[in-house]
Amino acid sequence: MSLHPSTFDYLKPTDLQTKIMQDVRLATREYAEFLQDMLPDGPDKTYVLRKVREVGMWANVAITREADGAPRDETLPAQ
């Protein structure tokens, strides 16, 4: 699969995508805070929290781009 020429360029999200990103960010934050409270301190907890942060960032990519990196044009359902 070839990557879209704009894959590594800045892509300004649409207003709807921005709203969805805010909702996803809030849900990710709440999950991370829950894990922060529930997991014992240590390297595994650190790893889990870093991965949750990574998942949140990849969710933003999924909201704005297709699998090949092309800008996502269709309207995503707002929750």
Image (cartoon, grey):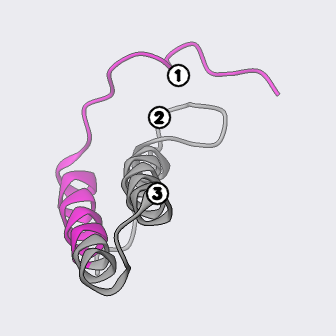
Identify residue type, mark 3: Pro
Residue at image location 17% in from the left, 51% down from the top: 15
**Which stretch is magenta?**
1-30
Q: Is residue 38 above or below residue 75?
A: below
- Residue 53, how many percent across, how many down? 36, 54
Residue carrying label 1: 7
Proximity of marks 2 and 3: CB atoms separated by less than 8 Å:
no
Left of 9 or right of it: where is 3?
right
Left of 28 or right of it: where is 48?
right
Secondary structure of the residue carrying tag 2 is loop
Residue carrying label 2: 71
The residue lying toward the viewer, choosing from 26 and 53, is: 53
- Residue 37, how many percent across, how many down? 24, 82
Residue at image location 19% in from the left, 70% down from the top: 26
Q: Residues within 10 Å of mark 1 (few under 14, many from 20)?
A: some
- Residue 8, how many percent across, how many down? 47, 17
Identify residue type, mark 2: Pro
Q: Is residue 15 magenta?
A: yes
- The CA span between labels 2 and 1 is 8 Å
Residue at image location 30% in from the left, 71% down from the top: 32
Proximity of marks 3 and 1: CB atoms separated by less than 8 Å:
no
